[in-house]
Amino acid sequence: QELFGEEAQGIVDDIIEPREVPSFAKMRLAPQRTSAPGSAPFSDDDDWAEGEEDEDMAAAYAGDFEAAPFLAGSLRTADPLDARKTRTWVRELVETGLLALLVFLSVRASFQNFKVDGSSMSPTLADGQFLIVNKLVYSEVDVDKLSKYVPFVSAGDDPTRHVFHGPERGDIIVLRDPSTPTQDLIKRVMGLPGEKIEVYNGAVYINDQRLEEPYLKEAWGRNGQGNYPAVIVPEGTYFVMGDNRDNSKDSRSSQIGFIAEDLIIGRAELSYLPLDAFGLIGNGGATLSEQDGRPRLTSQLKPESAAALASP
């Protein structure tokens, strides 16, 4: 008592019978004090009676306990904005994949790579050379069917027409072997439909005019391949030859003959391997001489062509 004075008995009573401590749910922080002018942060007027404080705390925390903000956030459902972002990302991924597939199929339908097998196109193309072939350049459209859906389009006398143009003289083309459809050949277009073509003494004559071929580096025809009697190229077909004239199975052979247009796959456009041969393919280049180059052997015709040449 001498040490604590009048408070001694209260301290002893608290030790023997401790006061009830309010639960966490009933606790709250002290009210915020302001330091606005004219009000002291802790004035004498702020002193509370013990009973009043307990009643205020009980009233403030009566009812259900409210979770702390950081706990409540974890109980919320997924943010709708995040769900929309996920759906957008998935949709863009699918659209990109479909677009890439469409581009691949379009390119595949228009271009295709081929490998030269053999030396029949030497020296223009070497064995093992890789090429890109344009499959769209000779494409055709059925004008008769198109006229049923598109106004002001008339089929006329030719219901099927080329979108761009047909094979032209000097074009290097890839075609299916008529005798072995599973095998592809690569040759150069020499004679067009309706033309007379003849080979004499290592030179090609088209309608009695000599064909100038600057892409041939050496003379040919030493092994009997330099002569071929005049023939008329039937409509819808083409006469093709390899640049290696002495070692090429082409339209001069009965196994190949005239090439129907539906056997033509496309025109070689680009060489990409080996790298030292990279570049565009030398299409064209064949021109008819302006001088009369009628050879001596125009009377030696194949039986099927004699009647055609004799008619006016």
Image (cartoon, grey):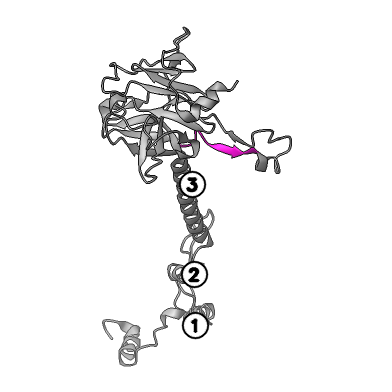
Which residue corresponds to the image point at 42% horizontal and 82% vertical from the top-left? 23
Nearer the N terminus, badge 1 or badge 3?
A: 1
* Residue 167 appears in the picture as rendered: no
Does 1 appear above or below 226? Answer: below
Q: Which residues are magenta?
A: 135-143
On the image, numbered disc 1 is attached to which residue?
51
Q: Secondary structure at mark 3?
A: helix
Which residue corresponds to the image point at 71% horizontal and 35% vertical from the top-left? 154
Q: Which amino acid type corresponds to the residue marked 3 in the rendered image?
A: Leu
Q: Is residue 139 magenta?
A: yes
On the image, numbered disc 3 is attached to which residue?
102
Which residue corresponds to the image point at 36% horizontal and 15% vertical from the top-left? 214
Q: Is residue 7 left or right of residue 97?
A: left
Nearer the N terminus, badge 2 or badge 3?
A: 2
Residue 194 coordinates in the image, percent (x, y): 53, 26
In-front residue for pair 161/68:
161
Within 10 Å of the Cα at label 1, are there few (<14), some (14-19), or many (20+) other Cα atoms? few
**Labels 1 and 3 touching (C-beta < 8 A):** no
Q: Which mark is residue 76?
A: 2
Residue 278 coordinates in the image, percent (x, y): 31, 27
**Measured Cα–Cα span from mark 2 to mark 3:** 43 Å
Pick out the residue farthest to the bottom.
Answer: 16
Q: Which amino acid type corresponds to the residue marked 1 in the rendered image?
A: Gly
Q: Secondary structure at mark 2?
A: loop
